[in-house]
Amino acid sequence: MGRDADATEFMHPRVHHRRAMRRGTIAALRRFASRQRLACAGAAILVAVALAVVAGPPLDRQAPDAVHISLMMAPPSAAWWLGTDDLGRDILSRLLAGGRISLGVGVAATLAAAAVGVPVGMASGFLGRWVDGTLMRLMDLLFSIPTIMLAIAIVGVLGPSLFNTTLAIAIVAMPPFARLVRGQVLSLRETEFVQAARAIGATTSRILRRHLLPNLLALVVIQGTLTVSFAILTEAALSFLGLGVQPPTPSWGAMLRYGYPFLDRAPWAAVAPGVTIMITVLGLNLLGDGIRDVLDPRVRTG
Amino acid sequence: MARFLCYRILATLPLLLFLSIGIFSMLHLAPGDPVTTMLSEDLATPQVEQTLRHQLGLDRPLYVQYWLWLDRALHGDLGYSFRSKAPVASEVVSRLPVTIELTLTAMMVSIVTAVPLGTLAALRRNTGLDAVISGIGTLGLAMPAFWLGILLILLFAVRLHWLPPSGYVPPWQGIGANVRLLILPGVTLAASYTAVLLRVSRMSVLDVIRADYVRTARAKGLREPRLVLRHVVRSALIPLITVVALETGRLLGGAVVTETIFGLPGIGRLAVDSVLNRDFPILQAVTLFMALALITANFLADVLYAWADPRIRYG
């Protein structure tokens, strides 16, 4: 949006938006590709990982939980591309199946965090007064505990499971959404088009949905991309500590947990999930930074 | 300044109160019964359970339990661990030195590496050097602490045998052993924190370097090293203060993971163990302590900020 906002700047943002759409999404994507090489590399990594995780398990001959006692800690070979773990399970199969858990938790937690955080931020910023005061003090409360520690405490209370881990990550990821959205709404509230909408008698809920929400989209997309990477890292950390998904369910963090006691005999069991987490998070961060550079020129990194 | 300090301290009190209520009720409304967890199968007759529940005060109304807990907590009595039966306060205090040593080491290492490197990257912006430094920062952010820790153990302990893989020796029992055991955890914990500080210091130096007064200083003939140190770095450090404080949470959270990998008997390890044992009083105390540490860090940041930037006046 920002880059070609010239004469159209003072129009209603939705009109502007529609024109930009007509001008061609393809052209915009091409411009993005030529200016944001790193972000494209990040997107390519993500597409590759997502494809492998979605298409991999059905194509896989091995069951991720199949135990081969005679093949314990076999090094990578033609038959076992990434080797086997301490129970003789195929690491590649587990990596693909675990990816469904890790990526699934990452995306689900982010969606849940945004689904609560965005309305909270909008209500806080637009309604102000005691709504703002109450909601923001609540966010302060969540902000005052280090994120991992808060997630650990929540999982500690609810008990470790796939659902509770996702819930805990969603809770700790929510306050940043609320704060960012609130800040944006505070400045949008004073703009002419919102004042105009109010003057012609639009209801609060209409203003929020039709006028503010579309203008928050960029911010939410940027924050969302970075939150997915945060969520994947947090899930991995919790599972690594034994407070995430429970065995035999594979997730990348859980694989690291059960691989690292055998570091001296079978390093591949820990190296494979570690590298996978790293490149996935790297891909997400590169893409998130790239999108931010394009959508929000004020905070350009370089 | 004094008024600002008073105001800032008073503003923290309600936060602390609600925090303690939140943490207290959250842990006590949780499903799962600490009494059944504490007793082994053959001992757990209803009679015994009843007595134990009464001894621990778990049969009283929640608000009474909170009030008693708060009253005792303010007197330094945080209850007894369900597991070890030792006083919670002494459990936590005995673990403190390890975590403090670890986090302060990591913080120092991070600041000392990140600020010069970030400044250098900004001064040589859009060159190969900048790309390399920024690239390291991006990689550092994507590197989970536990994964880096595992790699370091694999390389320096398992393969090269240069450093011990895990364990802890207090400094007063042997400073050499203490330092050797803290090198790998320190680097592990410092990594992502350094990456954040690196990005921020690069960006904030970039901001300052374009400022008018820097151009003026250069125009009046100030030499580069003096210009960078006196005019650029000094003002660029101000936003960094906030980030150092805000990211203390990252450091404390990272300590949980790092202590677990390297077998360090610190607060973070205590937190993980308390969850696995459903040891509520310990989990409560550790969560509160972490929050307290973070709130204090933010408070110090506000004070430092006001002190460093004369334009900012509160209250």
Image (tube, coloured by chain):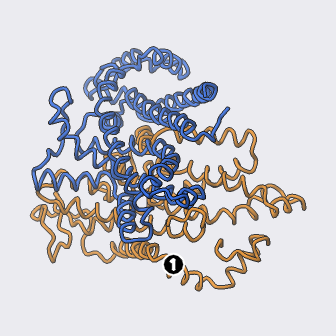
Chain colours: A orange, B blue
Does B266 sit left or right of A234 as displayed?
Answer: left
Residue A236 figure quarter: bottom left
Counting from the top left corner in percent of width and height, residue A15 is at 76, 75
Image point (48%, 17%), residue name: B74
- Tell me which corner region of the image, top left, top right, bottom left or bottom right, holds residue A188: bottom right
Give residue A210's position: percent from left, percent from top. Answer: 75, 65
- The quarter of the image holding the N terminus of chain B is top right
Above or below, comparing residue B10 to residue B200 in the picture? above
**According to the image, label 1 marks what residue?**
A35
Left or right, B201 with respect to B100, comes to right
**Chain of the residue displaying label 1:** A
Tell me if residue A158 comes above or below residue B216 in the rendering.
Answer: above
How would you rate the neighbour count of disc 1 (Cα within 10 Å): few for under 14, some for 14-19, many for 20 or more? some
- Which amino acid is tagged 1? Arg
Q: Residue B183, image x and y in percent?
A: 22, 44
State the quadrant of the C terminus of chain B.
top right
Q: Nearer the viewer, residue A222 or B127?
A: B127
- Specify whether A177 is left or right of A49: right
Left or right of B221 in this view: B92: left
Residue A195 higher or lower than B266, as above or below: below
The residue lying at 16 percent from left, 57 percent from top is A86
Snapshot quadrant of residue B171: top left
> What secondary structure is marked by label 1?
helix
> B22 above or below B206?
above
Residue at 64%, 74% in the rendered image:
A3
